[in-house]
Amino acid sequence: MKRIGAWLFRKTWEQELNDELRFHLEKQIAWKISAGIPPDQARRQAVLEFGGVEAVKEDCREQRRGFWLETLWGDVRYGLRMLGNNPAFAIVAILTLAAGIGVTSAVFSFVDRNLFRSLPYPDDDRLVSFGLLAPMERNEFLLGRSYVDWRKAPGPFEAMTSMIPGVADCDLTEQNPVRLFCAQVEQNFLPTLGIQPIVGRNFLPADDRPGAPNVALISYGLWKRRFGGNPDVVSKTIPLDGQPTAIVGVLPANFEMPNLLSPDILVPQALDETAQRKSDSGAVLRGFARLKPGINVAQAAAAMQPWFEDALQQAPAQFRDEVHLSVRSLRDRQVQDLRLAFWVLLGAVLAVLLVACTNVASLLLARATSRERELAVRAALGASRNRLIRQALTESLVLGILGGAAGCWIAYMLMHLFVSIAPEGIPRLPQATLDLRVVLFTLAISLLCGIIFGLVPALRMPTPEFLSGKEVRPKSRNPLRQLLVASQIAISLMLLTGAGLLLRSLWNLQSVPLGIQAQNIVIEQISLGQSRYPNAPQQIEFFDQLLARLRILPAVTSLA
C-alpha cells in the first residue's frame, strides 16, 4: 500500500508540475500575442525564453525532498541494465576488480591484526616488554636475582610481572589422559595485562609461594572441550603431572599470551626470593610491564638505566659488553622484524589493486567512446554536466561493488590458502578471518576503486558533432589512455622485478649448504611426563629401550 501511495503521490506531483509549467508558458505566449507578435513567433520566443520545459522540470524535481534517493536508485537500475546489455564487458571488468580487491583484502586481513588492530588488552599501548638483550637471544630476559628487587620499586611502571620462558609439556593424568601445554606465570600476570577470568578468580599472592597448594587457570578451549563449559569447574581438582591441582578460574576466549604462545593451563611460577638472591644470577624470566600514564617507552628506558647497570654486574664478564637494556612496546616485541615485510607486502597488493583499477578505467574509456552519441543526446535533452558525471560515477560504483562482492569470495579462499602453505613464525596468521572489519575494508576499497576508475570517463563530455548522425572518427591520440597504459606497464614491471628478486632470494636460501647431509634424516621430539619419569635415571632408561626397538627396524641405518 505504501508503494502504491508513493506512486500515486509522484504521479499527482508530476501532473501538478506539468500543469503549472504549461500555465506559465501559456501566459507568456498570451502576453506576447497581446503585444502584436504573431502566434507562431510568440510561441517560439516564449519557449526560447523559458529555457526548455524539461530542463525546468529537472530543476524543480531537484528541489523536492528525497529526490536524490530516487535519482540514485534510478541511476543504479540504469547502470545494471547497461551492464546486462554488455555482459562480456561486465564479466571482464568484475573479474579484474575481484582479483585485485580479493588479494588486497586477504593480505589486509592478517596485516591488520599485526599493524593496525588493537591488542586484546585494555590500554594495550601502555604494555611493554623489558629486560636485558643479548646477541644470542631475540627477546628480552630478566635474571631472577635482580628481578626480585626490581619488582618492589617498579619506577616508571604502574605494574610489572614475569613468566618462565616458553611453555612446558604437562599431563592431565585422569581418565582419558591428555598431553597439555602449561605456562608458569607470576601471580599478578593477568592483572598487569588487564585480564580478568570469565569464571572464577585470578591467582592470589598466597598461590605464588614455594610449597603453596597447586592451583591453575585453564584456557577457554580446554574448559569447553574437556569440561563442557560447566561453570562449576572452579570447584574441581585435577591431577596435573600426578599432583592434585585445584582449578581457580577460566581464561577469556580471546586471551593470548604476550609471547603469542597458546598454553592450555597457567600455573604460578612460585619464585623463591631467598633462593634467587643466593644464586649467582637466578632464574631466567621474561618481563612485562604496564607504563604509568604519561610515561613513554623512551622515558621508561632512561629511568631503568640505573637498574640495568646493577643487573649487568651479575652477568658473566665476557658478556657485559654485548648485553644492553631493552624496553619496547608489546606490539614491537610480537611483530619484530616483520613490520617492514608487512608494509612492503601491503604496498605490493595495493599496487596490484591500482593496476586492476587502471585496467578497468581503460575499459570504461573505450566503452565511453562507443556511448558518446547517447551522452550527446542526453545533454541535448537538458541533462546538465553534473547530472552526466553523477550517472557515470554511479555506474562505476555499481561495478566496483559487484567486483568487491566477488573479491570477498576470492579473499576467503586465499586466506585458507595462505594459512595452509605459509611457514611457521608469521604472527597471528591462523587468526586471519573474513570478519566485519575486513568486509568493511573491502567495501571501502570497492567504493574507492569505483570512484578512481570511474572519474576519468565521467569527466569526458560529449561534443555536438555526435548529434549529426554522421560517423565521427575518434582522435588519433588519446593522452589519457596513453597515460593509463604507461602507468600499468610501470607498476607491473615494478611488481615483476620485486617478485623475481624475492624468488631468487628464496632459491638462494634453499641452496645454502647446511654443513650436514640432510637427506633421509627424520627428527622426532619426545617429552616425557614428570609423573612417570620424574628423574634422570628413569628418563635415560626409557630412551635406551626406545633406541633398542628402533634399531631393529629394517629402514633404519643409523640412530642417535
Image: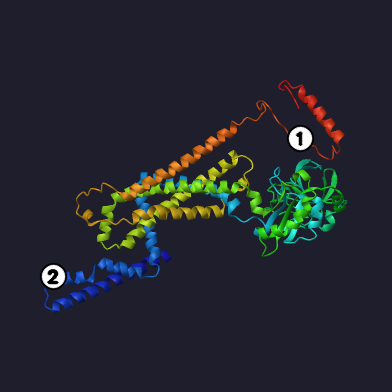
Q: Which quadrant would the N terminus be assigned to in this image?
A: bottom left
Percent position of residue 176, x then y: 78, 40
In the rendered image, which residue does mark 1 sit on?
A: 526
The amino acid type of the residue labelled 2 equals: Asp
Tell me if I can see residue 247 in this picture. no
Residue sitting farthest toward the top: 554
Percent position of residue 50, x then y: 23, 71
Residue 393 horizontal side relative to residue 126, left or right: left
Q: Is residue 264 above or below residue 191?
A: above
The amino acid type of the residue labelled 1 equals: Ile
Q: In the drawing, what numbered circle is on residue 19?
A: none
Tell me if I can see residue 522 in this picture. yes
Asked which colour scheme the image uses, the reply is rainbow
Percent position of residue 165, x then y: 75, 46
Residue 295 image-quadrant placement: bottom right
Query: Which residue is located at x 84 percent, y 40 percent?
Result: 531
Percent position of residue 72, x then y: 39, 61
Residue 557 horizontal side relative to residue 493, left or right: right
**Depth order, front residue of 210/7:** 210
Q: Which quadrant would the C terminus be assigned to in this image?
A: top right
Mark-to-mark CA distance, 1 and 2: 105 Å
Are the residues at dot 1 and dot 2 in contact (C-beta closer than 8 Å)?
A: no
Q: Earlier in the sequence, mark 1 or mark 2?
A: 2
Residue 42 horizontal side relative to residue 128, left or right: left
Report helix, strand or loop for mark 2. Answer: helix
**Depth order, front residue of 276/298:** 298
Residue 208 horizontal side relative to residue 343, left or right: right
The 10 Å Cα crowd at callout 2, few under 14, some 14 to 19, many 20 or more, is few
Residue 172 image-quadrant placement: top right
In the rendered image, which residue does mark 2 sit on?
A: 40
**Depth order, front residue of 93/547:** 547
Report helix, strand or loop for mark 1. Answer: loop
